[in-house]
Amino acid sequence: MNRTLLLLLGALALGTAMFAGSYVAARHTTMACCAQPDELGWLRVEFHLSDAELARIRALHEGYRPKCAAICAQIAAKKRELDAVLAQGLQGTNGTAGAQVKLNELAALRAQCQAQMLEHFVAVSQAMPPEPGRRYLAAMQQLTLGHHEQLEQTMSDAPGHEHHH
Amino acid sequence: MNENDQAHDPRIRELLRQARMAPGLPPRFQEQVWRRIELAEAPVETGSWLDRLANLIMRPRFALPAAAAVLLAGIVAGTLEGRLAARHDAQMNYLASVAPQAGFYASH
């Protein structure tokens, strides 16, 4: 093994070791210093919220959670109903029609969930100062609805998955 | 006291040492010595650019700065990535609490 290769491997190992050590240390330090007792810690740090702003958002958050949990439970129940219909088989008009009904109901519940989520995001953004509020709303839309749109886009672009209208 | 005894007398030796004229060093003597050493150590420049770079880095003048640069690059990149990862974790934690399919979003 020549000297150049040894030198490169040594530099690579040194750089990697430093990277790994710093990565772990920075991750733990950041999480430790900015850790909040609940999931709202990210909001406080990311959008530089004051205690009063965070308290308003916390109230909204606590009010939203049970509503979110309720609709999630309805979605889970509807998915079980759909699975039951699918398990019976889709042969015949009744099979596909039954599945269609369940799919429509599931879609309606998901839409209701998304609408409720958006409503919450808007309320939270309005509890923030204007600029962070805009940033928050854009980030949340990107992280939730945006990802769903990307997934749909990916699926429609996939070969053999074109929807001809 | 014979001549040999006088040579061992410390006082006479000190006087002799002080009387001996040391020739002055030419200007930039030390720098020229180092340059000669580096030239002597430098192999004939053949091979790929990688070999030439390795040879350059192995010279005493560049070895320490190069090692420091690698260390610093690793530390800076690791710190930035670690902070980003912690931020992403916190963001996903919040998202999971407000978006029912946060895990799904995070994994895509």
Image (cartoon, rainbow, N blue to C red):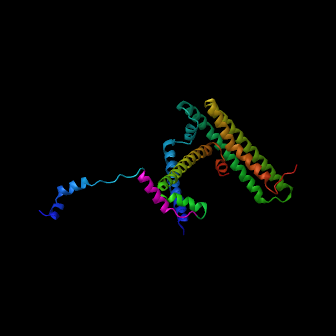
Residue B61 place in picture, x, y as percent: 47, 54
Residue A120 visible in rendering? no
Which residue is rendered at x = 68% and y = 44% of the image? A144
* Camera-nearest residue between B46 and A5: B46
Please state if A158 lies on the left or on the right of A49 as rendered: right
Measured as percent of width and height from the top left, residue A106 is found at: 75, 47
**Percent of width and height locating residue B14:** 21, 55
Furthest residue in direction front, as rendered: B3
Q: Characterize the magenta stretch by its predominant secondary structure.
A: helix
Residue appearing at x 62%, y 40% in the figure: A66
Q: Quadrant of the N terminus of chain A?
A: bottom right
Q: In the current view of this chain or complex, which residue is farthest to the left?
A: B1
Total marks placed? 0
Report if residue B23 is visible in the image: yes
Q: Nearer the viewer, residue A5 or B101?
A: A5
- Residue A164 screen position, x and y as percent: 87, 51
Q: Nearer the viewer, residue A145 or A57?
A: A145
Q: From which residue to which does the magenta span run?
A: B28-45
